[in-house]
Image (cartoon, helix red, strand yellow):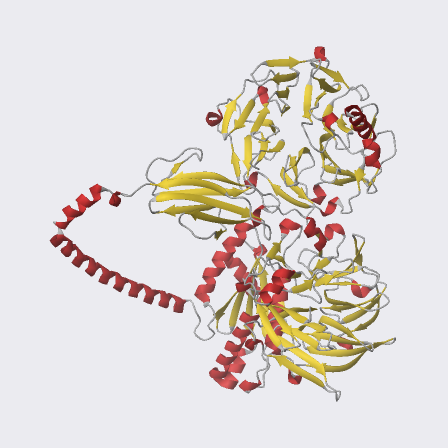
Amino acid sequence: MKQLSALLGALVFALLPLLTLAQPTFSTKSGDAPVPPLPVIEKPLDFYTLNTWNANDGLPHNSVNRITQDHEGYLWIATWEGPVRFNGREFVVYDDLAALGASENGVFDISSDGSGETVIASGRRGLMLRHSERTWQVLASADDFVHETVVLADGTLWAAASNAGVLRIDASGARRYYTAQDGLPDTYSQRIFTTGNDAALPRAFHHELWVGTEQGLAVYDATTDRFEAITALPAELVRAVLRMQSGHLAVGMASGLYFCSPELTRCGLYQAFSEGRVSSLLEGVDNELWVGTFAHGVARITASGVDYFGVEQGLPNLHVLDLFLDQEQNLWLGTHGGMVQMRNALFTSFTRRHGANGEFVRAIEQTTDGAIWVGSSEGLTRIFAQQAQSVAASPQLENLSILSLAPLSDNQLLVGSHTDGILLLQEGEVIHQFGVQQGLSLGEVRSILPLEDKRVWLGTANGILALTLDDKGFQQQFRLNRDDGLASDFVVGLYQDQWATIWASSIAGLTRLKQQQNGELKVEAIDLAGIGSARNVFAMTEQQQRLWFATDRGLLIYHPETDQWQQLARQHGLPFHSYFSIVFDRDGHLWLGSSRGIVRIDHSSLVQVLNGDTAILNVQLFNSADGIHNHQTNVGGPSAKLAEDGRLWFSTAGGPVVVDPASLQQQDLSPPPIVLEQIIINDTPVDRTHDWDGAIDRIRLVYAGLGFRMSQQLEYRVQLRGFDEQWEQRTQTQAEYTSLPAGSFEFAAQVRYPGSEWSEAVTYSFTVPNHFYETVGFWLLVILLGTLTTFGLFRWRLYALQQSRNTLKQLVKEQTKELQLLAHQDDLTRLPNRRAFDQQLRRRFAQAQQRQQPLCLAVIDVDHFKRINDKYLHATGDRILQRVAQLISGTVRQGDFAARWGGEEFTVLLPNTHLAEAKEVCERIRLAIAAQDYSDLKIEEPVTVSIGIACNTQGDASGKLLAAADKALYAAKKGGRNCIRTEA
């Protein structure tokens, strides 16, 4: 029976390559090379997400020669300035020769043993260092430069030592060199590779040891203690070797990339890979092959062929020195330009590099043919089958700033623009247009709502415009504005629910429009003040018999059956105030777009909070670490879309982004490991393996979660058991305790990715001994102090006087603080005054220069204000200034800084804002002021403003920025007022 089992096992192993090839998701290249089965991967390499670290981020050298990982989870990096340890946020550089105990610190290779408990660093002049249990040990040097090392399961160390051959150091320390006399094709050894006991490999390939020499490849035979050359490969320099999970051997040689069959009977050059020399090889998570090159970046080989990724796609340098896959399956590249993390992220961003026509996207829609249409500030893009193509078949579409989109039947598309009204497209060409010449004021269409009977409603800066559409084009039906009951004329969104009610969202409220039985249209402005603190409503959708509204104060939810409203805000776990887009996926999970990323709220959590079963939402935040090129989402019509294939699309300031919600379920969000990096008691570092013997006045514990997928989003919580009853959420990676009572304590820390489970806790136990007042000596001291009662009463009197003095000081301090507040606030408008603005300008200008971020400044002047003052007296002028100040402060974005500069002039600082974005904000200010109703002031003059804008590219001092903005304001006033000018 045992012989039969052995025979069956051998048969299965022999058929394994054929069985693997029969998998339906794999295919094989034809040609001379025995190509392994390769996967089909749909996502192009061009859409992968990159994170890069170099000398500016803490690396001691930009050349990252090798990368490995230890058993705790730290990444280790070999550089010419010493070995480096990385926890995802900070680099620890081991370049101190005294601490290393070595005469050389530059290392070319770094590797770990099978358990990861030992790290070996090696390099010039035969240097070899061993790191174990957080201490370094210098090994006896090899006889020549060490290119690479491996440690086998029995503790044997093997090193490729250039002209000295292959060095073997066994666990006892005995050393032996292998040369050409021991079977190597050539004594010069450059690469060494072991399969170890990789569970993914057939057992027959476990514990192999391969050596690449200048004249070919060899494998070690433990029974003869010799090497055997692979004669099926050419006798030339071997640069990389890899045994793949299919059993095939991949070898990078001087003449290119070779594949060998598992039994090594047939090898051949892979002709499809023809770009440059191979530097490193790695098998990916899906069994794809990654190839590092000397001059063409990194390549990925799949069933579809070879896909390259180089400098044009974001790689800092074309010479890839190493490839490494960490415990979370993140791909790392070592280059001459730093270290790169390359991930198939959850989100995919389409930028100009991918063919998008502009990246500041406001609207996304889908037509019946399945194509995704994207409207940006620079034109229209059509995305189909992962290919983005600019659409400009008609002259009207060239450089058209698009605000809204809406599909019609027969693949027709309605396009709302910023200046040219609404256009109807058929197969990408404009067939009808309705703009200013046809009666559309300003030409600005922010939302489009197609209705039955070929009716189309438009949301504009001057209310709602109803049109009809036939073969001849658009015809105007009627208009609605504030006089008709709208909450605001500036309509940013239109939505029709299942009850045929139309909702109009705006920058100053929400309106409900319902057709009555008598045919009249009932227009009702919703009193948002009675629901919550929201003022701006940006987007709307419908789900589960409820209407959902994204606002500047979280979410509003309307229940039509009960006519009840609910609000979800920061107190319910939402990370921000404002949300610009809202969409549900097919499983009922809610997705929100904000200026700081895309938020996902779990369906069950949402229901529980709405029903009052729990108080806090289960929220996940996604940003640039997840593949979003620019995590600012925009307001548009619509700015989020659930596509027919179930994927979600979002409009961002860095192009359209798409996510497959189903892939989120496939992501392994297991918590990363957490380690205690430092324990400091009374300013003395302590080894956690040793007990502290003595008093503890202060203890500080530094911890780190070793997660590299989203290292900046890791969440921590800590608990001092014996002192704290509950866990405490932390954003810092350290905890400090002082004046603890006597007793035994255990510190515990956990880490997780947002929305995932908490990790196992890392702990440290310590004991605080009895304090002096708990000893006999203390009570003797008390008796002694009893004799000093009189002196104590005298000191108490002094103390009382001191308390009175402190009380008086506090009163003076509070009065001073109140005076300082008054000194920085304008009495009339309650805006910050010129003094406060000057301080903010200097501070934010310096901050922008330091961070290399844009900073824009707008100077706003009320047109003909002196004439208004003279005609209607100063009291009316003051009320106009108050009204203008309220409109400015209510229109600027969160983070902007508005102030009264003096007289009728105001200023707005717009940090981290490019000129195009600043113009859009200022245009909203200008329109809001011009559209404001001033009839209650009984003036006949229109109230408008002129605005000058400048950005910090015009100079290296804040004064120059202010002068440039003032110059632009002068140009605006000279150009006819009620307009915006910029200083180039």
Q: Which residue is drawn at 39% across and 40% down?
A: 766
Relative depth, front residue between 382 and 549: 549
Query: Image height check: is 76 above or below 818?
Result: above
Query: Image height check: is 192 above or below 599?
Result: above
Q: Is residue 902 left or right of residue 412?
A: left
Give the residue furthest to the bottom. 518
Q: Residue 177, percent across and down?
A: 64, 14
Relative depth, front residue between 933 and 809: 809
Q: Quadrant of residue 556?
A: bottom right
Is residue 973 visible in the rendered image? The answer is no
Q: Quadrant of the N terminus?
A: top right
Query: Image height check: is 6 above or below 730?
Result: above
Is residue 36 visible in the rendered image? The answer is yes
Q: Quadrant of the C terminus?
A: bottom right
Q: Residue 625, percent across and down?
A: 63, 49
Q: In which quarter of the image is residue 776?
A: top left
Q: In this view, does 879 lie to the left or right of 299?
A: left
Q: Residue 141, percent across and down?
A: 56, 18
Q: Residue 903, percent across and down?
A: 48, 73
